[in-house]
Image (cartoon, grey):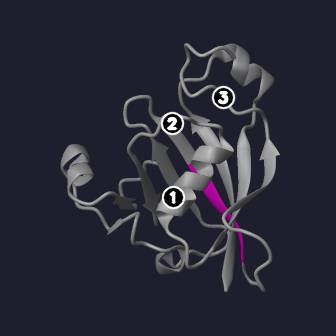
């Protein structure tokens, strides 16, 4: 079974200057199995950053990182496709990690909440064949505090 070790950085979003100064780097390292979906990765990221209000999201794979127009977009079929314009490469509920043909040291984007625009860069730290121990996906490392999902929430 392939296990992907991914480092997820928040690179922009509605974060106050005070919070950003106290937390210059905000990342979570997540392990996920190759047979798990992008939706399961989204759920792991959502929980890892202590979010509580779900919104639309997409993954952008194959470019040089977040918001690269050459990336393939993965989100929810039809509805989201019409909202954002352009064709989707796949549905997050059906696309598993192994389908993406990721390589070690690759980077890809994750865009959460199309109104507040939380942008993340995901770096592939490792892809290993392992005997499974424990539940996946799982957070293995946290750097920095999770910013409030909304600026009006106390920091």
* Residue wearing tag 3: 147
Measured Cα–Cα span from mark 2 to mark 3: 11 Å
28 to 11, vertically: above or below? below
Q: Circle 2 sits in a helix, a strand or a loop, which is it?
A: strand
Q: Nearer the viewer, residue 54 or 58?
A: 54
Q: Which quadrant does the C terminus fall into?
A: top right
Discs 1, 2 touching: Cβ within 8 Å: no
Measured Cα–Cα span from mark 1 to mark 2: 18 Å
Upstream in sequence: badge 2 or badge 3: 2
In the image, residue 130 lies at what x, y percent?
Answer: 77, 84
Residue at position x 76%, y 20% in the image: 21
Whether residue 65 is visible to the viewer of this picture, yes or no, is no
Which residue range is magenta in the image?
121-127
Residue at position x 26%, y 50% in the image: 80
| Magenta span includes 34 | no
81 to 133, vertically: above or below? above
* Horizontal arrangement in the rendering, residue 7 relative to residue 98 (left or right): right
Whether residue 83 is visible to the viewer of this picture, yes or no, is yes
In the image, residue 68 lies at what x, y percent?
Answer: 42, 53
């Amino acid at each position: 079974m392939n296990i992907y070790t991914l480092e997820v950085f928040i690179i922009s979003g509605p974060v106050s200057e005070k919070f950003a100064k106290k937390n210059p780097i905000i990342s979570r390292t997540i392990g996920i199995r190759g047979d798990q979906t992008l939706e399961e990765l989204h759920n792991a990221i959502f929980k890892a950053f202590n979010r509580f209000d779900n919104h639309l999201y997409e993954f952008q794979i194959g470019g040089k990182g977040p918001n690269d127009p050459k990336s393939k977009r993965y989100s929810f079929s039809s509805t989201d496709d019409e909202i954002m314009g352009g064709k989707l490469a796949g549905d997050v509920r059906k696309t598993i990690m192994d389908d993406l043909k990721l390589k070690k040291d690759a980077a890809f984007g994750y865009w959460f909440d199309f109104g507040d625009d939380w942008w993340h860069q995901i770096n592939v730290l490792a892809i290993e064949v392992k005997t499974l121990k424990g539940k996946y996906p799982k957070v293995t490392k946290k750097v920095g505090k999770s910013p409030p999902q909304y600026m009006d929430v106390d920091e």
